[in-house]
Image (spheres, rainbow, N blue to C red):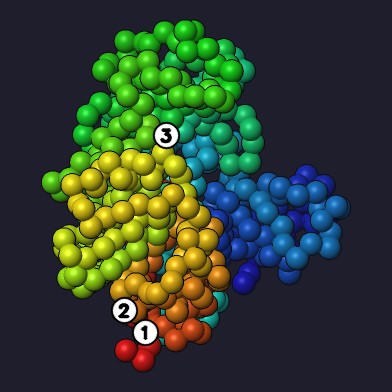
Amino acid sequence: MSTDAERVPSETALGDRLLTLTVGPPAAGGTFVARHEGRVVFVRGAAPGETVTARLLEDPQEKAEARFWRAEALDVLEAGVDRVPSVWEQAGVDGVGGAEWAHIALPAQRRIASEVMQELLRRAGVSSFPIEQVQVEPAPHDAEGLHWRTRVRYAVDAEGNVGMRGWRSHAVRPVGEDPLSAQSIRDLRLGEWTAPEGTEAIDAVAPSAGPASVVLIGRDLDPDSVEIPESWGDADVAVRTARELVALRGEGTVHERVGERMFVVGATGFWQSHRRAAELLTEVVETTLRAPRGGSAWDLYGGVGLFSAVAAVQVGRDGSVVSVEGNRRASHLAAENLEDLGQVSTATADVTDWVRARRGGVDVVVLDPPRSGAGAELMGLLAKAVRQRIVYVSCEPSTLARDLAVIEKKGWKVVDLRAFDLFPHTHHIESVAVLERAEG
Ligand SMILES: C[S@@+](CC[C@H](N)C(=O)[O-])C[C@H]1O[C@@H](n2cnc3c(N)ncnc32)[C@H](O)[C@@H]1O
């Protein structure tokens, strides 16, 4: 790859920590690869093919032997074809994090994410599925990739200013229009509010049913110090201290509707963030799980029961579904959410421990682990225990790729793999892999 860095006297460039770099293919974490004097530099805030002035994030003297450096694009000298005016002025270098591709055209973001995903699968050695077929698809009706975020954690500084943290700093920066957040979160205008002393963070939720929710988080925050501003309208409000959650308005929960079913979720508990995600992933699990009527299913990392509801309909009243979830509150809510489905039971446990302790197998499994993925031990256990199908829902393609490579070696094959842009303007990718026994 060519680099303009040679044109810059290297002593000066390194002394200033400024480099002129021509940026190439995407790498993990939303960065792009450039080279400076043969060394790889991962550049944030750039777009493919462009030449930028970048600030080095390491001390070149200290990191003289390092295999790679990291840098942030400060100025664009020659824009790439994918660059557009940022959808979020306050995001990016020296701004808020969490929208690191806001300056890249949405179709290009999806093309780049597809390249990243394919490369991760290739590197992990996934071999049973044609990797070039994996293309990141938009969520239905998401033309602009805006107003999709239904869960937002704001940071609060010592003066009570509400904003978000930067890419690599603890400074709380203003969020401005916050165009990725759902409208009912934007309407709260949290960025204009001064939080009471002791507030460390604020969780805002825009559920699909019922009012929005605001939870002020602070170890020693005094619930009596909170004056609810008018701009919060009828939003539910709670305070979470180190000891308890105190609901000031509402029950400390939110309501999410998927099709005909309503799910109650803890106000700070997990739910899929994109406003179309729960519906879309439900549809994908519905069409791929194929749990046999009267058969058995496990919903691992089950949260408040989203995919257990799908499995329960498929196995019917004579079948059985176990939702396994580590968070006590989520597991309890799953039991309540699905109490009309007698074929569902819940277990509050670490998934790997729970599966390790099972005697006998199961027909199908859906699993949806956190970013760290399922891991080799669990994949090995599932390879033995599952008779028919595994549907693996993932929010981190690197750990998905690693886990797929493990189970392929244990006699399973990937029969379908879809990827979705459920985090527009960021580098994150949601995906669903469907696995069957190779000999089957
Ligand atoms: C990505 S969420 C998926 C939740 C659910 N499937 C949904 O779509 O709403 C992952 C869930 O796994 C739970 N979890 C994380 N690590 C776990 C572990 N080791 N054992 C059991 N549950 C775990 C989290 O509490 C969280 O609810």
Which residue is tagged 3? 268
Q: Earlier in the sequence, mark 3 or mark 2?
A: 3
Disc 1 from disc 3: Cα separation:
38 Å
Distance between the alpha carbons at the discs numbered 2 and 1:
7 Å
Residue 388's tag is 2
Which callout, 3 or 2, points to the residue nearer the camera?
2
Whether residue 59 sits left or right of residue 416 in the image: it is right
Q: Is mark 2 within 8 Å of ligand 1?
A: no
Q: Quadrant of residue 250?
A: top left
Q: Position of residue 133 (x, y in %)?
A: 34, 77
Q: Amino acid at mark 1?
A: Arg
Q: Is residue 307 left or right of residue 358?
A: left
Residue at the image position 29 percent from the left and 61 percent from the top? 321
Q: Is residue 153 above or below residue 322?
A: above
Q: Indicate the quadrant containing the C terminus: top left, top right, bottom left or bottom right.
A: bottom left
Secondary structure type for disc 3 = loop
- State which quadrant residue 165 falls in: top right
- Front-most of 340 and 112? 340
Tell me which residue sits at (45%, 10%) in the image.
226
Disc with the residue nearer the chain's start (2 vs 1): 2
**Of helix, strand and loop, which one carries label 1?**
strand
Q: Which residue is mark 1?
A: 437
Residue 166 picture location, percent across and down: 57, 36
Disc 1 + disc 3, Cβ < 8 Å: no
- Of residue 43 and residue 163, the one placed in the foreground of this image is 163
